[in-house]
Image (cartoon, rainbow, N blue to C red):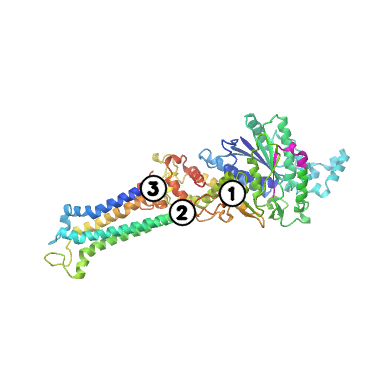
Amino acid sequence: MRQSEWISLLASVIAGALLVLLGQNVLFLNVFAGWLAGPGMSLQDYLENASSPSFKLLWVGCMIALGIWYWHTFSRSTRSSTEVRRMRPRWWIAAGLLVLFGWLAQLSFTVFRWQVTGTSPLAGGGVTYYPVPALGWVLLLTVVVVDVVLLFWLPTVLASPRSHRFVVPGAVLLRGGR
Amino acid sequence: MTLFAIGVGGSGAKCVEALTHLHACGLIDRGSGGAGRRSLGTFLVDPDQQSALLLRAQTAISRYSDLRDAITDRSERFARGDIHDYGHWSPLSSSSGAVSLDQVFPKAILANQARGLAGLFDCLFPPEEQQADLEVGFRGRPPIGAAVMNRINLEQEAQTGQWQQMLADIESAAGNGEAPVIHLFGSVFGGTGASGVPSLGLLLKNWLREQNLSSVTVQASLLLPYFDFDGQGDGDTGVHAEARSFQLNTDAALQYLRASGPSCFDRVYLVGSDLKARFGFSIGGTSQSNAAHLVELLAALGAREQAPANTSGYAFVISRASQGRISWEDIPEDEVVGAALARGARFAVAWLNNLSLEIEAAQQVSMGTFLSGAPWARRFFSPSGAPTATSGGRPPIRDATELSLKTCIDRYAETLLQWLQQISSNVGSGFEQELFSPETLKRTSSPDNALHKVVRGKARPDRPEASDTVETIKIAMDGLPAAAISRVGMAGLADALWTLCA
């Protein structure tokens, strides 16, 4: 792997971590507060107990997937371009599973966790889930997709090693013009 | 400087075939430190126009020649040596359609006009030799060949036909201040070579003397017995070569060489083998398809040799260190020759069994799809699949001219691979070679990756087995700095592969 690819990989991982672990909550609090806070819901409390843990879990999942991708593409010996391209469906499967995993994490921390224990996350009691409005759900599920793009697609498209440099969707367009 | 190679007879043709491959591997060009030879002229002499050996040599020459014509100056290092094919000439062609000795020397006329000569003719040649059809060669009988060959009038031949162009080029090269070398190849134990090589050497030396071309050197690689026949001819085959005569023919040829050698050649290289390869018996023609042999490679390497200016040597021989094995250490100038042949073998395997198949696969999908699995391809071909202003001269991968060049490279690489496979597998019983792995020198239908087994011994590149693959080469191509890729298209790809196969 070239030096520029190592730098791209490191930069995209650090940028992704900063955005997901820190920047996202700032955005939710200051830009999308009205979309996420349902009736009787403390947004601060929701971010601390549901949103942040679920996105941290997604981050960990993305880092594990990234590690597996790099280990596999580094160690895999290919004889032809056809063999290299066989990695593309696997990449799509990995990305799809990460999105599903992210959505499930949101559902778990916002709804399932409370319903399983039978407790209410709201201060005054009531419903056994965070009553996130519909628009909030759309936002959360979209942010999961954006996070997978930042945490998995970006590092893999910028720095997939050896013969697999262009196998990630968009890589030819992004890096093939040289 | 130009090397003019003349192959006489079947073994001579096989040596010219070997020399063509050495030339393709860059071994005739001695670089700035040597005489700087770049051009090879080839000329094949054989009365047997149907000879499979002649056809094979012609195939190698024409395929390399086609490759050179297609690649022109579009490569920096790959296939840079020029070749000029002067074609094939039969010594019977100057005998007005005669196909037997009694037609070459019309016996009826001799009997009428020179009864004594007719008697001498009968005394020298028994009836079966007089009437034998010579269109399949001189049937392992040097006296028949010598009688026909000595009728050649080179002065007359220089006015027309295949000799004309070559002799004119020799004159021209000598006139340009070069020191051209004429190198003859042939066996001394058969019929055509044993009679033709000394006869032609003598004729050429005399012709050069008459033309005052003192800068031209005439040398020869003479093949001593290195094979036996598995079977033998019967009554139906008429006069034919016999393995038991090989030693007798050789003794006679060496005696002649000892007495008259310097009048035929300035220098000779003698090579043979005590451990014989086994070839099936053939009277000649299309059935004579003896596989290529290491001895022919060694004979061809003689044309590379440059004797010191003040050398007193005339006849040079070669030997091996181990009785039952030949390795790179036994090859003259093995560092250079080994590296060049190893590169040629690795190139042929990598090209035919991988990159050529990749280019074919690229014709089935869009360029974008192909590039997603082949990042290296964008270095040589337009990434958009069409010639654009931003492609920097890179042609489309489907360009007809590029595909035509690919066909030329495929055809030559296949010929080279087949020759390498034969010289490394056809060594004779009880004899081993430590040069190449013959089982890897074969064309495969699906892409192959491994290169580490292709070359054996000290010429094998010093790389870990796991990284000695075509994939590693492709990755290296992808990462080459722009300045290292001065040529694009199919020629640029072959050039980069040639460089990285070293």
Type of the residue with mark 2: Ser
Residue B86 seen in this snapshot: no
| Circle number at residue B415 | 1
Q: Quadrant of the N terminus of chain B?
A: top right
Same chain letter for marks 1 and 3:
no
Q: Which stretch did the figure color magenta?
A: B256-272
Type of the residue with mark 3: Arg
In primary-sequence order, the first of circles 3 and 2 is 3
Q: Which residue is mark 3?
A: A2
Task: For mark 2, give the secondary structure.
Answer: loop
Near mark 1 (Cα within 10 A), the count class, few <14, some 14-19 or many ≥20, is: many
Same chain letter for marks 3 and 2:
yes
Position of B370 relative to B88 (above/below): below
Residue B115 is one of the magenta-drawn residues: no
Task: For mark 1, give the secondary structure.
Answer: helix
Specify the farthest residue to the left. Answer: A124
- Pick the front one: B43 or B273: B273
> Which chain does the residue under circle 3 lie in?
A
Q: Is residue A122 left or right of residue B67?
A: left
| Circle number at residue A80 | 2
